[in-house]
Image: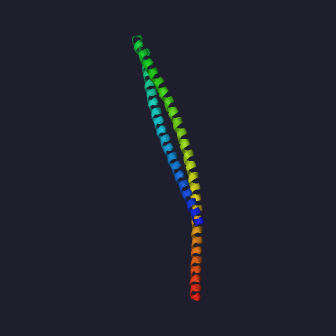
Amino acid sequence: TGDAASGAARLAAGSRDLDDGAARLAAGTRDLDDGAARLAAGNRDLDDGAARLAAGNARAADGASQIAAGAGTLKDGSAELYAGNVAAARGADLLADGTSALSSGAAALADGAARVSAGAGTLAAGSSALQTGATSAADGAGRLATGAGQLSAGAATLRDGASAAA
């Protein structure tokens, strides 16, 4: 019964290790999902920044053509050029924000991958412990069966002795 209890304890420890591994794997998957969401947000910011930069460039080009077209529209062209430069600066800021979000998403993906790897290691250790526990439980069951056979033989010997004494 000591071996069976030891096997059961090892089996329980293996199950806990498997549960821990599964929890780490789930945490790593959540981190990967978070990283993917950050990456998608960064891509959207990059797209917005590129669109604003293109709009700013278009305004800047429009302002330059108005300046070249005539002195009468110089003031209007200058204002358009200024607005284009402001839009370009905003686009550059959005581009920088998108790059930062992209970097953060990549870091979160790397962290998630590390957690998934750690979870896989824990899962493997838990599987090994579970196998060891199952082997110990099987050994204990064999010993219990041997002991039961010996008890049965002893009982038969006692019955024979009691019959002979009577």
Q: Nearer the viewer, residue 84 or 123?
A: 123
Q: Nearer the viewer, residue 87 or 161?
A: 161
Q: Is residue 111 visible?
A: yes
Residue depicted at x 48% and y 35%: 42
| Residue 15 x, y percent position in the rendering | 53, 57
Q: Quadrant of residue 10?
A: bottom right
Count of numbered circles in the view:
0
- Coloration of the structure image: rainbow
Q: Quadrant of residue 56?
A: top left
In the image, residue 60 sits, relative to residue 112, either above or below, namely: above
| Residue 79 x, y percent position in the rendering | 42, 16
Q: Is residue 66 visible?
A: no
The reply, left or right, for residue 20 in relation to residue 59 is right
Q: Nearer the viewer, residue 81 or 132?
A: 132
Residue depicted at x 57% and y 75%: 148
Q: Nearer the viewer, residue 46 or 166?
A: 166
Q: Quadrant of residue 14?
A: bottom right
Q: Quadrant of the C terminus?
A: bottom right
| Residue 67 x, y percent position in the rendering | 43, 15
The reply, left or right, for residue 13 in relation to residue 33 is right
In the image, residue 26 sits, relative to residue 83, either above or below, namely: below
Q: Residue furthest top?
A: 72
In the image, residue 144 sits, relative to residue 78, either above or below, namely: below
| Residue 31 x, y percent position in the rendering | 50, 43
Q: Quadrant of the N terminus?
A: bottom right
